[in-house]
Image (tube, rainbow, N blue to C red):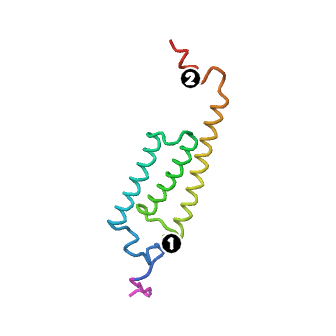
Amino acid sequence: MSGHNHNEHDDHGHGHHGHDDHDHGSVRSYVTGFVLAVILTAIPFWLVMGKVFSSSSTAAFVLLGLAAVQIVVHMVYFLHMNAKSEGGWNMLALIFTIIIVVITLSGSIWVMYHMNHNMMPGMSPDVMHHDMP
């Protein structure tokens, strides 16, 4: 016999100790997440197709806000992420992801704005379209 006793309730460092069955999702939680995701997809579609906002920048900010809410819905209802799961590592991954997304989106918007602003005269899409034979 080995001198090492194995307890069937030991965690062994895998991070599974203390998880309840409801952490893995139920049909009700998946249906709730699906319904919220559909609503959060239909609202932006309606806002854009119905031309609800006269300002495109206002529409863009509202769409970004709804997209952020949808990301949270997906993480909570489908990925089952919360502040307590996996000993807090999920929260650290979430914070890192948010930082990367903010850097990517703000950098992309900044580059597109400056490329549009610094175009050579006569190179705007409206002028180029009218010059075509």
Q: Is 51 left, or right, of 127 in this rendering?
A: left
Q: Residue furthest top?
A: 133
Viewer-proximal residue among 63 and 75: 63
Magenta-tinted stretch? 1-8
Q: Is residue 73 above or below residue 5?
A: above
Label 1: which residue?
A: 84
Q: Is 36 left, or right, of 116 in this rendering?
A: left
Taking the magenta stretch, the answer to whether it contains residue 6 is yes
Q: Quadrant of the N terminus?
A: bottom left
Q: Is residue 33 above or below residue 59?
A: below
Q: Quadrant of residue 92?
A: bottom right
Mark 1 or mark 2, which has the lower sequence index?
1
Residue at 44% across / 40% down in the picture? 50
Label 2: which residue?
A: 126
At label 1, the amino acid type is Lys
Q: In terms of secondary structure, where does tag 2 sit?
A: helix
Q: From the top left corner, tell me how far across and down residue 112 is, in percent.
A: 61, 36
Taking the magenta stretch, the answer to whether it contains residue 76 is no
Residue at 42% across / 86% down in the picture? 5
